[in-house]
Amino acid sequence: MFEKVNSKVVKVDVGQAGGVVARTGAMLFYQGQVAFAPHQIPGAGPGMGGGGLMRMAGAMMAGEHERTMLARGNGTVHYGFAGLEVQVVQMQPGAVLRVEASRLLANTAGLQASVVSVASSGGGGGGGGGGLMGALRGAAAGVVTGQGMFTTQLSGQGAAVLLAHGGFLELQVGGPNPVVVDPQAFVAAYGNVQTELKSAMGWRDAVGRGAGEAMQLHCHGQGVVYVQASEEKL
C-alpha cells in the first residue's frame, strides 16, 4: 500500500494497490507503465435530479469536492501536495474514515467512497436533522466555521493518505465524554466515530464574531480523530 518517503511524500505500487485515486495535481513522479484518467466519487457530481433543493445540494457537493485522478497499471507513483504533512491510514473492515475533501491526498481504488453531510456524520447532526434538509440546514454552520458542508466517507479494506498543516494529532475517542474539536482544525475521523456540529453561542454572536470557536465539532463513539496543528484551510 502507501509508504511514507518522508513527512510530506508517499509512494505506492499502483499494481499491488489495485489502482489509486488521488487529488488532481498530487502526482509528483512515477516509474513504470502507469495510466491516469479523471475520476469522480459517486454522489459528488452536479447531476442530481429532482427539484431545486436537490440541485442545490448537488452543486454544493460538486463545489466542495476536489477533482481526482485514477492511476492504474504497473509501476510506482510518488504523491505529495503543496508541501503539506501526510498521514497514512490503514483501513480495516467495518471501520469508516470521514475526511474533509481538501484534506484527502489519495486512497486505494478498492475502497467504497461516498459524500456525506459533515453536520451529522453517523448521527442526528447538530440539530439540523437528517437527510437532505439536515444537510442544507448545516450550510450556515459551514460558512461560520470555514468548514465545508460535505465530507468524503471511505470504507472497506485498503488505505488512505491525509493532508495537514503543521503535522497531525491523533486523538482517541471513547468513553462517556466526547472529544470536542475546533472544526477548522478537524482533518478526519476513523473507526466508529459520530460527529455532531454544535453552536457554542448564539447564532447572532457567532456570525458577528466569525470565529471558528463559535462552533464545536463533538466526536463520540470509538476510534480516532485526526486534528492538524493549525486552523489554516487547505
Image: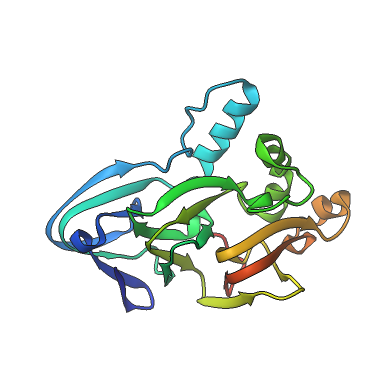
Left or right position of 165 against 128: left
Q: Quadrant of residue 217?
A: bottom right
Left or right position of 158 against 100: left
The residue furthest top is 51
Viewer-proximal residue among 75 and 191: 191
The residue furthest left is 33
Viewer-proximal residue among 54 and 200: 54
Q: Please count the marks in the image.
A: 0
Pinpoint residue 67: horizontal percent, then vertical percent.
Answer: 40, 45
The residue furthest front is 94
Q: Residue at x 44, y 49 (%)?
A: 113
Pinpoint residue 192: horizontal percent, then vertical percent.
Answer: 59, 64
Pinpoint residue 137: horizontal percent, then vertical percent.
Answer: 73, 40
Residue 231 visible? yes
Q: Residue at x 61, y 76 (%)?
A: 171
Left or right position of 199 against 38: right
Viewer-proximal residue among 8 and 37: 37
Viewer-proximal residue among 48 and 16: 16
